[in-house]
Image: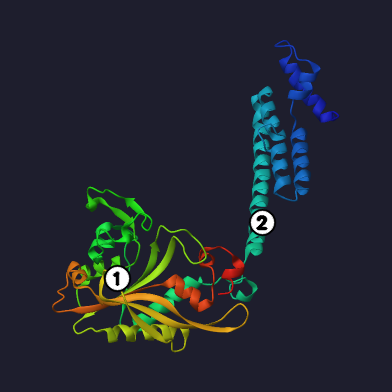
Amino acid sequence: MGFEKFDFFWYFKILYRNFGKKSISFSTFCNVKTSPRQVSQVFQKAQSAFAAVEDLESLALFEQTFLGKKGEIALLRKSLKELSPEEKQILGPEIQKGFEVISSQAEAFRTKHASKALMAQLEKDWIDVTKTEAFSRGAIHPMAQLQRRIEQIFTSMGFDIADGPEVETEWYNFDALNVPGTHPARDMQDTFWVTHDQKDAQKNVVLRTQTSNVQIHWMQKYGAPLRMIAPGRVYRNEDVDMTHDATFYQVEGMMVDKHISLAHLKGAIETMLAEVFEKDIKVRIRPGYFPFVEPGLEVDIWFEYVDKNGQEQAQWLEFMGAGMTHPEVLRNGGIDPNIYSGFAFGFGLTRLAMLKHGIDDIRLLSSQKKDFLQQF
């Protein structure tokens, strides 16, 4: 930068004032002396540079060059220490004023462009929720669909929907249901034991093997009369294959009142099946043994289907266990069997879903395969 006439005499005045006090080299002389014209030139340069700022990235570079701790305005301020008090009074406020003007412009630019960037991002991420056809919609899992339908059917017949613990004591899972200690269901091959103390059965805890445990809880809590179904997840220590799983779903049902008979049980089952399959289903009832009912029954359904070869087929399928609630089970639930009677049934919700939808592999119902799940 060349010396203007005005600058030369101003520098000479400072040089004369400091002459004899200390030695000043020419390079030092040129670097430390600040004139009004230099200040003006720095701010003119800053304005020209600011006019070229286009985005937040170039703004950051501009601020570093002029407004940063080592920027040009900071160097102007630092050079003031070499001036006289009179000179500082003149140039100091000018430098501060220019700094404030540029800082204000930079902040206004940042606010404006940050707002634009935000609006651009919002526009990019905006979703029109009224245009649902543009999205790949999910679906309710077939098991959940069927469970909801079962619940609707039974609530229409006056039943409540019950729930109970999946981690259960041995007493509620077995003893209260009149399952003797020697029954095969207690064997380690069938039951997942959380704690298994052979000396103190009160400490034993299992993953429930059926939803029948909810019967006892609800009888103890609500007494009689009682109508309830308990859909839920159960656990069996079994090998997993096309027809067996270690985790599956059941529905337990129970009705307790005065003068309940097997006719009420048969009517409830036939109504439920007709609603699920949307047609009348033939039912066959056979004697069966279950510790918690007396008499015990096996309920079969006449199942019609089309096989893989396109041939129409039909056969009797075992569907559920049922019967009149055992008097001992009523007593364990706090209900007098001399006054009340009841029926109970339990069926596999998972198996019913397989029958309804023609699913031949139980493992598909717990898979994440989209091509399977998207069918529903």
Q: Is residue 227 visible?
A: no
Element on which disc 2 rests: helix
Residue pictured at 66% horizontal, 55% vertical: 112
Residue 102: image quadrant is: top right
Q: Where is residue 305 in the image (x, y as percent from the top left)?
A: 54, 82
Dot 2 alpha-carbon crowd within 10 angstroms: few under 14, some 14 to 19, many 20 or more: few
Q: Quadrant of the C terminus?
A: bottom right
Residue 265 to residue 126: above or below: below
Q: Where is residue 220 in the image (x, y as percent from the top left)?
A: 20, 68
Label of residue 117 in the image: 2
Q: Position of residue 163 (x, y in %)?
A: 33, 68
Q: Nearer the viewer, residue 316 or 235?
A: 316
Separation of disc 1 and disc 2 at Cα?
Answer: 70 Å
Residue 105 to residue 119: above or below: above
Element on which disc 1 rests: loop
Q: Nearer the viewer, residue 34 or 367?
A: 367
Q: Which of 161 and 87 is in front in this view?
A: 161
Label of residue 123 in the image: none
Dot 1 alpha-carbon crowd within 10 angstroms: few under 14, some 14 to 19, many 20 or more: some
Residue 370: image quadrant is: bottom right
Specify the amino acid type for callout 1: Phe
Q: Quadrant of the N terminus?
A: top right
Residue under circle 1? Answer: 290
Q: Which of marks 1 and 2 is nearer the N terminus?
A: 2
Q: Nearer the viewer, residue 22 or 311?
A: 311
Residue pictured at 71% horizontal, 46% vertical: 57
Q: Is residue 197 visible?
A: yes
